[in-house]
Image (cartoon, rainbow, N blue to C red):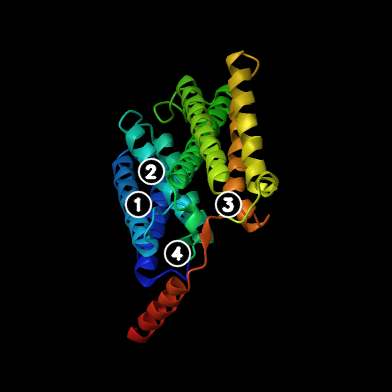
């Protein structure tokens, strides 16, 4: 995060501060049963989404392309999608646990963004194709929907345990019903499966058209850790939805499986680049951008 351009760093610090304050307010909302905080949480989520969009615009200007191929930009888009989902659903779901849960999810995504933040890079020439935009958008939206499904799964499992323990008071008026949480979990899983399918198809199209220009053979793509993990997640999502439809899986099992698939997909997006050294990368080093970062940081230091 320290390597970001000064303006990008200031905008991102604004997102971090907003997210941290929102998380603290969400805890207060639960601890003191203060429903008035809910409106403040939605307002702060709106600001986070706006600042995230501003940061993406700054990245688009820097690389002169759609900012969706870098891991940092992908996490920012994930944050924006989750934030917009929260803002949309908050008009219909006003329970304090829902707003608090979504606020904490946003905070976790912001922390992930801070871990992977790095200066902008430019696209490889072979990757400058509409396939890349469709592929990146589909994959990021799939990630957003599986994160949403996981959040609803956690609320579902917590509510279910409370009900089994006959602890009704913590849930009354504060938590969406079990049926609604299960429906939202399934909605997130279905949307994630659809968008992940689009992402895989567009990725196959990209490899078929630009494989040589990207410096990777078909075998390299098929053996890449990120591609393998995404394919496993897609098969897992398909199996989960089919088995749930045939009443083989209960709501509890579907919720638990959603958590596992969420971890798998997020690890494929982020962990494979950090720990598995995935070659699934459409960026190249940009000497001009690198020198621009050093120059701006030097000027910023001298000014202070």
The percent position of residue 125, horizontal first and vertical second, equals: 48, 58
Do the numbered discs 3 and 4 sit on residues whose CB atoms are within 8 Å?
Answer: no
Element class at badge 4? loop
How far is mark 1 from mark 3, CA to CA?
21 Å
**3 or 4: mark nearer the eye:** 4
Q: Which residue position holds label 1?
A: 48
**Residues at badges 1 and 4 in contact (C-beta under 8 Å)?**
no
Task: Using the image as rendered, state which of residue 285 and residue 25 is in the foreground.
Answer: 285
- Of pointers 2 and 3, the one earlier in the residue sequence: 2
Q: Measure how far apart labels 1 and 4 are at the Cα level.
A: 20 Å
Q: Answer whether residue 200 is visible to the viewer in this image.
A: yes
The residues bearing labels 2 and 4 have C-alpha atoms spaced at a distance of: 23 Å
Q: CA distance from mark 2 to mark 3?
A: 20 Å
| Residue 121 marker | none
- Between disc 1 and disc 3, the foreground one is 3
Does residue 273 sit above or below 166 in this rendering?
Answer: below
Comparing 164 with 210, the one in front is: 210
Check if mark 2's residue and mark 3's residue have beta carbons within 8 Å: no
Disc 1 crowd, CA 10 A, few/some/many (<14, 14-19, 20+): many
Q: Would you name the residue on which mark 3 appears?
A: 270
- Answer few, some or many: residues within 10 Å of disc 3's Cα (few below 14, many 20 plus, some between 14 and 19): many
- Between disc 1 and disc 4, the foreground one is 4
Q: Secondary structure at mark 3?
A: helix
Q: Nearer the viewer, mark 2 or mark 4?
A: 4
SS for dot 1 = helix
Q: Does residue 256 show up? A: no
Displayed quadrant of residue 41? top left
Q: Earlier in the sequence, mark 1 or mark 3?
A: 1
The answer to whether 73 is drawn above or below residue 167 in the figure is below
The residue tagged 4 is 120
Q: Position of residue 97 (x, y in %)?
A: 43, 35
Q: Nearer the viewer, mark 2 or mark 3?
A: 3
């Amino acid at each position: 995060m320290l390597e970001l351009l000064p303006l990008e760093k200031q905008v991102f610090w604004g997102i971090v501060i907003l997210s941290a304050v929102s998380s603290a307010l969400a805890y207060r909302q639960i601890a003191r049963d203060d429903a008035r905080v809910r409106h403040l949480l939605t307002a702060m989520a709106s600001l986070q989404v706006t600042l995230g969009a501003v940061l993406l615009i700054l990245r688009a200007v820097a690389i002169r392309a759609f900012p969706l191929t870098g891991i940092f930009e992908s996490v920012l888009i994930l944050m924006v999608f989750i934030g917009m989902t929260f803002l949309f659903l908050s008009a219909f779901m006003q329970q304090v646990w829902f707003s608090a849960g979504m606020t904490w999810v946003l905070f976790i995504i912001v922390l992930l963004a801070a871990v992977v933040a790095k200066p902008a890079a430019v696209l490889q020439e072979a990757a400058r194709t509409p396939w890349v935009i469709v592929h990146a958008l589909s994959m990021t939206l799939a990630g957003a929907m599986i994160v949403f499904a996981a959040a609803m799964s956690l609320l579902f499992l917590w509510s279910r345990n409370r009900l089994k323990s006959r602890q009704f008071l913590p849930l009354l008026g504060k938590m969406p019903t079990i049926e609604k949480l299960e429906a939202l979990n399934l909605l997130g899983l279905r949307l994630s499966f659809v968008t992940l399918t689009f992402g895989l198809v567009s990725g196959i199209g990209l490899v078929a058209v630009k494989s040589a220009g990207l410096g990777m053979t078909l075998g390299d793509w098929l053996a890449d850790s990120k591609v393998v993990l995404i394919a496993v997640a897609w098969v897992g999502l398909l199996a989960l939805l089919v088995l749930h439809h045939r009443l083989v899986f209960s709501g509890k099992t579907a919720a638990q499986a959603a958590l596992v698939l969420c971890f798998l997909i997020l690890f494929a997006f982020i962990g494979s680049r950090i720990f598995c050294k995935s070659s699934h990368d459409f960026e190249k080093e940009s000497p001009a951008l690198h020198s621009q970062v050093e120059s701006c940081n030097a000027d910023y230091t001298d000014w202070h």
